[in-house]
Amino acid sequence: MGIEPNPYVPPVAGGFVPRTSSSTAVVRDAYWWVAPALCAPLVLLMAYADILSSGMPLDHGLTLGYLVPLAMVAASLLPERTMRRRPTRVTLGLLACCLAFFYSKLVMLVAIVVFLVLLLTGNVQV
């Protein structure tokens, strides 16, 4: 009566090859600056177009919300400058452009939802 191997243990994977240091080499991105450089003026243009289309006065406190897309473009400069992070920079820039263009519409949508909730809960009488 000897020791038998456990039949329920999965077999060791054959052909496992550990990664070498050359397979994890970092590929530097020479054009890391293109997405933030294109999106910065585009965000300003989208914000200007949104302000013109909505008629929001510039001295209103809600216009400070247009700084959020600019901060997103600034944040697209922060990831490491490798090819792996290029989609992150492009995505942040494009989301910033969309947010700058639809900011006044989002503010109006939030105001309508808050009004409806207050109306349905009985906190506002019309």
Image (spheres, rainbow, N blue to C red):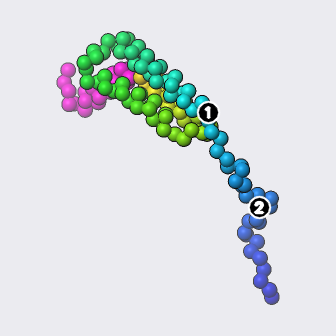
Q: Position of residue 81 (x, y in %)?
A: 56, 38
Looking at the image, residue 46 sits to the left or right of residue 22; the answer is: left
Residue 115 percent location from the top left of the image = 27, 26
Screen quadrant of the N terminus:
bottom right
**Residue 52 falls left or right of residue 41:** left
Q: Nearer the viewer, residue 112 or 33?
A: 33
Bounds of the magenta span? 102-126
Q: For residue 13, which numbered disc appears in the image?
A: 2
- The answer for how far apart the CA atoms under marks 1 and 2 are is 40 Å
Classed neighbour count for the residue bearing mark 2: other residues with Cα under 10 Å, few (<14), some (14–19), many (≥20): few
Residue 87 - label: none
Q: Is residue 112 visible?
A: no
Q: Is residue 100 above or below residue 14?
A: above
Measuring 32% from the left and 12% from the top, which residue is drawn there? 55
Percent position of residue 63, x then y? 31, 22
Residue 62 is one of the magenta-drawn residues = no
Q: Secondary structure at mark 2?
A: loop
Which of the 4 quarters of the picture holds residue 109? top left
Q: Position of residue 12 (x, y in %)?
A: 76, 65
> Residue type at mark 1?
Ala
Q: Is residue 44 visible?
A: yes
**Viewer-proximal residue among 87 and 124:** 87
Dot 1 or dot 2, earlier in sequence? 2
Q: Pointers 1 and 2 in contact (CB under 8 A)? A: no
Residue at 76% over, 57% down: 17
Q: Residue at x 73, y 69 (%)?
A: 8
Q: Secondary structure at mark 1?
A: loop
Label ID, residue 30:
1
Q: Quadrant of the C terminus?
A: top left
Looking at the rendered structure, the kind of residue marked 2 is Ala
